[in-house]
Image: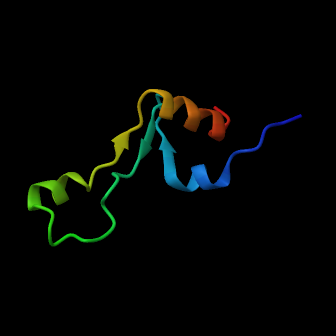
Amino acid sequence: MKRKTHKGMRKRVKVTGSGRILHRHAFSGHLFTKKSSKRKRKFRKDVVLAGSGARKAKDLMGI
């Protein structure tokens, strides 16, 4: 039986060509007035998911 992709995970992550998982920064949705400009700048780039989280995400994505 074919495995299905977890739709919630598909919306939240991107798989690179080399198979790494990219996702958004945590704490980057609201309450920006208390966060420094440097910190807010770093939120713009996606982050590579590492360790057991990456293994879990790949399993949900069916990779």
Residue 34 location in percent, x, y?
A: 14, 68
Q: Is residue 52 above or below residue 16?
A: above
Q: Nearer the viewer, residue 34 or 40?
A: 34
Report if residue 30 is visible in the image.
yes
- Please give left or right for residue 59 compared with residue 34 in the image: right
Q: Is residue 23 above or below residue 58?
A: below
The extreme left residue here reads 37
Q: Is residue 29 above or below residue 44?
A: below
> Measuring 70% from the left and 45% from the top, which residue is drawn there?
5
- Please give left or right for residue 35 compared with residue 31 in the image: left
Report if residue 19 is visible in the image.
no
Which color scheme does this rendered protein use?
Answer: rainbow
> Measuring 42% from the left and 42% from the top, which residue is drawn there?
22
Q: Nearer the viewer, residue 9 or 20?
A: 9
> Measuring 64% from the left and 40% from the top, which residue is drawn there?
60
Q: Quadrant of the N terminus?
A: top right
> Measuring 49% from the left and 28% from the top, which residue is drawn there?
52
